[in-house]
Amino acid sequence: MNKTIDIHLAQTLFSLDEQAYIILKKYLERLEFIFIKTEGGKDILEDIEVRISELFTEIKTGERYVISVKEVEQVIETLGSPEDLAGEDAETYETKSNFSEPKKLFRDTDDRFIGGVAGGLSHYIGIDSLWVRLILLILFFSSIGGVVLVYILLWIIVPEALTTADKLKMKGEPVNVSNIKKKIKEELDQVSNSVKDVDYENLGNQLKKKSKSFSDFLLKLIKGLFRIAGLFIGIMFLLVSSVSLLGLFIGTILGSVFTAMIPNELLQLGISMDLPVIIIGLFAFLIAGIPFIFLFTLGLNLLGNNGQVMGRTSKLILLGIWVFAVIALSIFGIIESKAFAVTSKKSELIEWDNNASDTLKIYLNEHQKYSETITLFNNLTIVENELGESFRLDNNVRLYIQKNKNDQLGLSIEKIAKGWSQKKAIENAGEITYTHDLFDDQLVLDNFWISPIKSKTNPEKVIVNLSLPEGKYVYIDSDFGDYLAKKIKNNQEYYRKRIAGHLWKMEDGELVCQDCESVKAGLHIDENGLELNVTDKDASLEVTIDENGLQIKQNEE
């Protein structure tokens, strides 16, 4: 088993194979021997360590990844060997590195008047920074200051080129030992020349220093405003998420108590599937609650919480649960919406001779036998039979009366139901139980039907079609008025309830009333006024409105 050694490079922890550690240690010791007496050698060594740390970070694939000998040798090959630097001039060694790296955007604070954005863009684009500043100035006036917002965003987002490696990346130069050494020497030469020319450039340096001080103040001010805005948004996120989570928690507790007090079969009445209500409630709670949990953690982060409130694994698990709940509830909703897509009916045809009497009497049979076991829930009526079995009871019954072409009485009972398919709809219709009784001159119809409680919210109904032969008399009991169809042809043009309680005769395809009072009305309007006459067999009423006012005359015969 190979031994591993933990080291720190640029304040970052790495685990190395023991042999890889020995190779890296010797490499750094040789570099230290070469640069220790060189001007700026300490800075060169620090930048080399930063670059090695960056390369190791690119290699690592996990927290405890162990860097091997081969990977250390690749890093050394990228940076260059100390022997090459000791035996050759840096400029000569640079010519061997004829490849270039892609440029990265940084802010060049060595060439800045405000934030170094223009200097960084000049290196990235490959033109002089003076031209970039002129372009920004033109855009400033042409966009009425809109480019200022873009500049501020770039100032905040684009990182500053702090290390030598950052400055090399900014110019697209390979980050190796030779270039690091060359760059640091150039900076030292610039500092040296600045010291020598201090009297000559004194005024310019003072102006530049003041400009940098103002830009630093402006940057701190903008960052402060953003920090205040972040704190305010974080407080709002915490407040909204906390109140929402508390409301969801209280609602869940109250809902659990409520559902525990209601029998499960009653809870299931609101849905067509046999999915427990508690599962649906759990999915709804997860869909509503998990986003507020994420909002709560985001609020803590905006308030400056440096500790990790929630790990990446926990976030992924919560996100997966939320996506699963959304998909599951969506599938349930689709299935539920298709549960009653198809309508079907099942018919029962009955014909019988009614020679005992010319008059058929229709009476109503109410659900009195269920009067002591009725339970009302969610606009549904649940009843129990003698065996304690639960059924759904509904009064959606309608009676239609029409002419029969044959000389017999005809009765058809249509049971109509819905389902997600034709087969299921017919099956649901067949489970409807509707009873009636036929006597010689009496037809007793129930004003209700029952179906298994599993049918739940299926919009079922029963239609009773009564066909009368020509000349047949029919008497409809007054209690049946609420269950008559809307359009039954009759000579009085009565509507539903008014048809009940009278004796009728089927003539020429319509019902002719045999005991209705004949009422005649007439209305006449001209330039002289309005005249209304209403007469029946017992009295007459005359109403006149003219220049003399309102006049009412009533005559009784």
Image: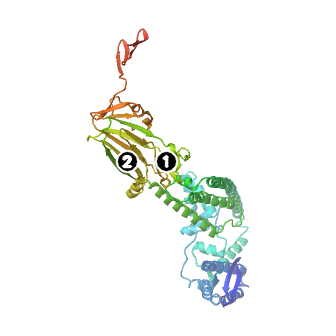
Q: Residues within 10 Å of mark 2 (few under 14, many from 20)?
A: some
**Residue that mark 1 sits on:** 393
Q: Position of residue 442 (x, y in %)?
A: 38, 39
Q: Amino acid at mark 2?
A: Glu
Nearer to the camera, 162 or 18: 18
**Residue that mark 2 sits on:** 414
Asked if residue 546 is positioned above or below residue 170 in the image, the reply reads: above
Q: CA distance from mark 2 to mark 1?
A: 17 Å
* Callout 1 secondary element: strand
Asked if residue 89 is positioned above or below residue 212 in the image, the reply reads: below
Image quadrant assignment for residue 63: bottom right
Nearer to the camera, 213 or 390: 390
Mark seen at residue 278: none
* Callout 2 secondary element: strand
* Residue sitting at the far front: 356
Residue depicted at x 57% and y 69%: 123
Q: Position of residue 465 (x, y in %)?
A: 35, 42
Quarter of the picture containing the N terminus is bottom right
Nearer to the camera, 211 or 12: 12
Asked if residue 17 is positioned above or below residue 62 in the image, the reply reads: below
